Image (cartoon, rainbow, N blue to C red):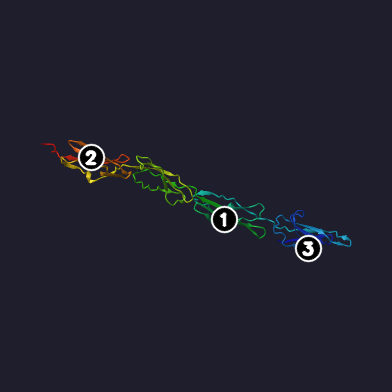
Amino acid sequence: RDVTISVTATGGTPDVVIELFCGTAETGTRLGIETVTTVPSTVTFTDAGDTCSSGYTATLTDSATDSGGSVDCTAIATVPDIDCCVTTLTCTSLPSPTVECAFDPEPGEKTVAEVATKIEGSCSGDIEFVGDPTVQVEGDSCTTTKTRTYTVSAPGRGDTTVTETCDETWTVVDTTGPVISNVGDATFECPVDDGTNPPPVTDACGNFDGEATSTDGTLIGGCSANTGTKTRTWEATDTCGNSAIPVTQQITIQDTVAPVLTCSDSTNSLSNVGCDAMIPGASAGDCTATDACDGDVSVDFCCTFDATNGFTRTWTASDACGKEASTVQTITVDATCGTA
């Protein structure tokens, strides 16, 4: 900025020393010093403080002397009225909301009056947007932050323009766990427990991809080691680390099927055994039994005899849950034995 000062004088022709200050001569900053020897005259101070916002002050000192001493004169300096305005733009503190999953709808663009203001004493002129705002997206599906940046401008001192950038942000987060649907209890026949189909899982933010997983508790209260009731707990965690409230179901393993009894040919029934024949003996190995739930089971046999029905031998297999399988061998003796 150039500052030009006009100097006039009365009462003589002075040598005038001119000092230019930003602010007052007592407290301001001296911007330059010049001397004029003729009046009227003008003095220009070049680049005299572009940042001076408090106004200019000029002081004049008569330094001329001759053989008679100091010249008695008065110098008058005229400091031009210079526009010393300063524009300062201040961004408004815009809301920075955070929501779960998604904005519906997203925040709309703000007006220039909502985005920025000028401090008191700024240069005249309105604030305007410079171009369209830009939007930057950062983060992932768990936390996404969007920043809308506005550029605003307003007239400054002289022909200058002051600009400022102002940001508006909003954030989308996923802090909610998925939801596991309720699942009914299930009953299986021992030894089958092929699991149950995983219950459906929903996630409000769409960050669950997979199936619920299960863990089983201890089997208790059954009639054998492989029967009873246990608790199956279903769990699910989304990709953001949010866990669902676990869902439980009761699993019952029951044994309603009797063992399978297998006997050798020696256990077949016999008819009309001769009078002098011996009734065939029996051993535990004549019949064996297996059980789907308990594996191998023991086989017992016992016998009865009466004159009418003959000799009866029964093999019986019982599992731990009281289910039985049996086979009967009947041996009849020739009815003519003992007659004349």
Q: x, y percentage for residue 266?
A: 22, 45
In terms of sequence position, does the residue under pointer 3 or pointer 2 come before the other?
3
Residue contact at pointers 2 and 1, CB within 8 angstroms: no
Front residue of 290/287: it is 287
Q: Which of label 1 and label 3 is nearer to you?
A: 1
- Residue identifier under label 3: 41
Quarter of the figure that contains the C terminus = top left
Which residue does the image show at 77% across and 63% down from the upper left?
Answer: 42
In terms of sequence position, does the residue under pointer 1 or pointer 3 come before the other?
3
Q: Secondary structure at mark 1?
A: strand
In terms of sequence position, does the residue under pointer 2 or pointer 1 come before the other?
1
Q: Residues within 10 Å of mark 3 (few under 14, many from 20)?
A: few
Which residue does the image show at 17% across and 40% down from the upper left?
Answer: 332
Front residue of 274/234: it is 274
Q: Can I make out residue 179 in this image?
A: yes
Q: Is residue 335 above or below residue 240?
A: above
Q: Can I make out residue 111 in this image?
A: no
Residue furthest toward the bottom?
38
Q: Amino acid at mark 1?
A: Thr
Q: x, y percentage for residue 136?
A: 54, 56
- Residue identifier under label 1: 149
Q: Which of label 2 and label 1 is nearer to you?
A: 2
Task: Tell me the number on the disc at residue 98.
Answer: none
Q: x, y percentage for residue 98?
A: 53, 49
Q: Is residue 56 left or right of residue 325?
A: right
Front residue of 249/201: it is 249
- Residue identifier under label 2: 313
Q: Amino acid at mark 2?
A: Arg
Q: Amino acid at mark 3?
A: Ser
Residue 59 placement: quadrant = bottom right
